[in-house]
Image (tube, helix red, strand yellow):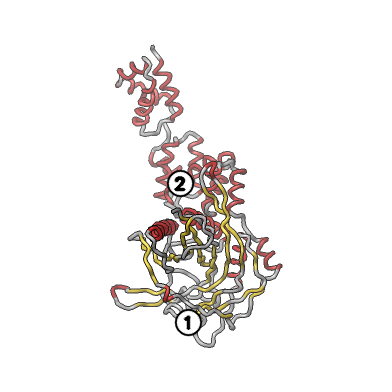
Amino acid sequence: MEYEVVIGLEVHAQLLTESKIFCNCTTKFGEKPNRNTCPVCLGMPGVLPVLNKKTVDYTLKTALATSCQIAPFNVFARKNYFYPDLPKGYQISQYELPVARDGYVEIELGEGEHRRVKRIGLVRIHLEEDAGKLLHDEEGENYSYVDFNRTGVPLMEIVSRPDIESPEEASEYLRTLRSILLYLGVCDGNMEEGSFRCDANISLRPKGQKELGTKVELKNMNSFKFVQKALEYEVKRQKDVLEKGGVIVQDTRLWDADAGITSSMRGKEEAHDYRYFPDPDLVPLRIDRAWIDEIRRGLPELPKEKLERFMREYKLPEYDARLLTTSPQVANYFEECVREYGDREKGKVVSNWVMGEVLRVLKGDDLGIRNLTVTPGHLARMLKLIDAGVISGKIAKQVFEEMYQSGKTPEEIVKKKGLTQVADEGELSGVIEKIMTANPDLVQNYRSGKEKLFGFFVGEVMKETKGKANPKLVNELLKKKLSDNI
Ligand SMILES: [Zn+2]
């Protein structure tokens, strides 16, 4: 039997505000445990939470960028459960009346002519506070610590409709959503530090069946790769169970990256009843037209708009524009480099270097581009050295590597390492003659029609000059010398 995969994703995005959602403690990551706390986020009796307006601004930005309906009247609710990382015994969240609902994210699927756009619906976007963090078995001690620094850090929960039909689509959806949040500047998108987290609901059903199968919740996937792998594993696991005539048990499973499997975390008997009710400590949140308009006016250029502009303004192929605009940091780097280079027509040349060498040294850490030793200015100056014939494209790769390692300017490196291109006709002629004298048979073979040998001679010249010969001149001179004296 053929099965259809049905996936829905819940993303928790930590908002980039300076202070927490209901108190003025800092949200700074990496502080000593329990430093960033106060009576409000520790849930002391008698304290009152006050909503941080910025968290609503950021949620509205996200809602507008994903075409959501914004609710004029919002209520915060208490989600009650007992866990040591939750000092109040409840989490302030939103339940029946979230800030936004019914939006969508457009993702691109397939390659070449099969490329298509698919809309993944959003059920809702709501605001809530994060819980603390438990630290187990520190330095071999057999008890646990709790760190409340994260308690009260603002989170935006973005819940998709079960419109996702494969692990690849899930991965693409997350990439697109993360990119939108990065552009909006509302979240830093760091999956490893947990500021962009994802849980997944996945079920299988026989093809054509309307009714959904039993769903399983997946947690603990802290990279795009793991999300995809965990979902792939789960598709296979559920298919195996169903094909053997078994039934899927509704449960929550954890992804174990080392073992490459998911395993059950808690069964149905522990399913929670959160007893939601409106938080009496917080007044309802009213969002009027004027507030929404103000946010709309301040929206930045979004990934799709930037992609279209890059194709138009820099005449880039779609592939390049897409790769460069995935993160605003990479897009800014590219634009600054073109600006320094001073020639918009040569956008493709810059794009080749950014997509090639720059992204290679970043190793997928697009945020790291901010601290890259090779600044856009240095890269632009290096491109000018190629244009001026001072270095060849091949040597430029070496210069780039050196800039990356040392942070020095391209001019300094070229000078210090003696990498200036050999474009002196006399000098190159001498090298060519030497090689021809050393290989009389091959010269003879070439002259009698074995033209493929041309590449061998080019290679020898490059070897002799340590790659510094001007390739165009080498070609010209070689052609001339090899056809002489026939
Ligand atoms: Zn606090």
Quadrant where the image shows the N terminus: bottom left
**Mark 2 sits on what residue?**
409
Q: Report how far apart the C-alphas of labels 2 and 1 lie in the structure.
A: 57 Å
Q: Residue 17, how many percent across, how many down?
A: 55, 68
Residue 478 picture quarter: top left
Please name whichever residue, 94 or 62, is drawn nearer the observer in this view of the structure.
Answer: 94
Q: Amino acid at mark 1?
A: Gly
Q: Is residue 118 left or right of residue 296?
A: left
Q: Which mark is residue 255?
A: none
Q: Residue 30, how many percent across, how many down?
A: 43, 69
Q: Can you see residue 229?
A: no
Please tell me whether residue 112 is drawn above or below residue 68 in the rendered image.
above
Residue 460 picture quarter: top left
Please name whichever residue, 362 or 460, is drawn nearer the observer in this view of the structure.
Answer: 362
Q: Residue 83, how many percent across, how many down?
A: 43, 79
Q: Is residue 222 left or right of residue 350?
A: left
Q: Amino acid at mark 2?
A: Thr
The number of numbered discs placed on residues in the rendered structure image is 2
User: Disc 2 vs disc 1: which is toward the camera?
Assistant: 1
Q: Which mark is residue 89?
A: 1
Determine whether the residue tagged by mark 2 lies in a helix, strand or loop: loop
Determine whether the residue tagged by mark 1 lies in a helix, strand or loop: loop
Q: Which residue is painted at 50% across and 71% down in the image?
A: 27
